[in-house]
């Protein structure tokens, strides 16, 4: 019998975040990437600090390599991310022009990115993480320390989100445009953020703009309440927009306890949660709105947690690129 793969088992795209360095140099990594996934999101390669690290001097090479990889493996590319207060180069962080000059930087970046990838990148996270964790307001203040507030919000006013969607749409009218955030996966617990995402969607629509979908990042852990996950999927699906679980990973040691051991019990709990997610997505989100589920990388050998030195094992493949229990259960959840 042929061994099933994730991409062949689901009726919607199964995605993963990808980094250019292992994609180009690690055969094990690139083989799994090509075999198992039908959609890719550049983890960093299309971010502002990687591409326009010097003003109006765009280095598209890392993103272009991903587009080529995707083309030769019949994969969709989801662009990430045009507007974010993080991953900005120093020249932006220290820019001291007036609001007209800020608007110029903002529009130029969005337009250049979307135009360059027109017809190749079918969808974009246009605005990422613009909402305060606690009260649902737009983050204009450095409330959580220097540089934590959005420079875009500070210099461009609250309507910058509406204009970001407008500029992206003008550059490629066929592209699917998303608002992407975390903490909107916990309906019943963090309702302020969910309400605020929906009001962003409405503000773009009311201004006559185009918004195609909502990205629910889903960086969760074993204690994230399944009932709340289901409730937030239900509320977002009610908008009628495309729904992308855009950055799924499931932490087993969220407090980063150095003594934590990834025992059989924890492996099983993680596996069950992956299965629950895939199954619930299929049940709650109508078929026409199923943009797909994307995990944030696929192996613990190359995860954000491992690269930042954490004792955590969030993904589908282990440190040796072997399938975990999480993989088998995720596959089941995608299928039935
Ligand atoms: O590439 C350089 C390397 O040359 C250098 O030696 C090294 C030393 O610090 O840094 C490398 O760049 C790092 C890059 O990841 C690639 O690994 C950056 O410092 C680091 O800040 C960057 O972190 C990424 C982060 O976003 C900021 O862009 C994470 O990998 C990435 O997983 C994370 O992704 C975010 C999403 O975009 C938005 N949602 C949350 C999500 C997880 O935090």
Image (cartoon, grey):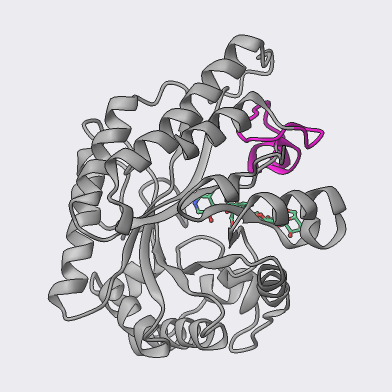
Question: Looking at the image, is 100 positioned above or below residue 147?
Answer: below
Residue 334, horizontal then vertical, whole percent: 48, 39
- The residue under the point 22% across, 64% down is 201
Q: Residue sitting at 64 percent across and 27 percent down?
A: 312
Label tally: 0
Tell me residue 39's x, y (percent): 57, 60
Instruction: Give the quarter of the figure containing the C terminus.
Output: top left
Magenta stretch?
300-322
Name the outermost residue toward the left: 206
Picture quadrant of residue 163: bottom left
Q: Is residue 69 among the parts visible in the rendering?
A: yes
Left or right, 3 with respect to 234, comes to right
Quadrant showing the N terminus: top right
> Viewer-proximal residue, 261 or 68?
68
163 displayed left or right of 83: left
Residue 146 appears left or right of 46 = left
């Amino acid at each position: 019998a042929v061994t099933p793969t994730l991409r062949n088992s689901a009726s919607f795209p199964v995605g993963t975040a990808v980094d250019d360095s292992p994609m180009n140099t690690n055969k094990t990594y690139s083989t799994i990437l090509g075999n198992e996934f039908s959609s890719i999101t550049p983890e960093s390669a299309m971010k502002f600090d990687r591409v326009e690290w010097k003003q109006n001097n765009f280095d598209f090479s890392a993103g272009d390599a991903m587009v080529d990889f995707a083309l030769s493996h019949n994969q969709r590319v989801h662009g990430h991310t045009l507007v974010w207060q993080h991953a900005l180069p120093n020249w932006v962080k220290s820019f001291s022009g007036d609001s007209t000059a800020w608007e110029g930087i903002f529009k130029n970046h969005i337009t250049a990115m979307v135009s360059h990838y027109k017809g190749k990148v079918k969808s974009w996270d246009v605005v990422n993480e613009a909402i305060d964790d606690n009260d649902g307001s737009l983050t204009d203040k450095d409330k959580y320390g220097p540089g934590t507030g959005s420079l875009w919000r500070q210099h461009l006013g609250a309507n910058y989100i509406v204009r970001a969607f407008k500029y992206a749409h003008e550059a490629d009218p066929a592209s699917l445009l998303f608002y992407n955030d975390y903490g909107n996966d916990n309906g019943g617990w963090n309702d302020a953020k969910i309400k605020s995402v929906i009001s962003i969607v409405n503000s773009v629509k009311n201004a006559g703009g185009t918004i195609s979908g909502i990205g629910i990042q889903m960086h969760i852990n074993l204690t994230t309440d399944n009932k709340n996950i289901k409730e937030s999927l239900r509320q977002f699906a009610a908008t009628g927009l495309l729904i992308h679980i855009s950055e799924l990973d499931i932490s087993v040691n969220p407090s980063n306890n150095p003594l934590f051991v990834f025992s059989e019990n924890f492996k099983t709990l993680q596996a069950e949660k992956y299965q629950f997610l895939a199954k619930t997505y299929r049940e709650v989100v109508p078929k026409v709105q199923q943009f797909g589920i994307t995990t944030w990388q696929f192996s613990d050998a190359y995860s954000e947690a491992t690269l930042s030195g954490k004792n955590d094992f969030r993904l589908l493949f282990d440190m040796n690129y072997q399938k975990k229990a999480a993989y088998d259960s995720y596959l089941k959840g995608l299928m039935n």
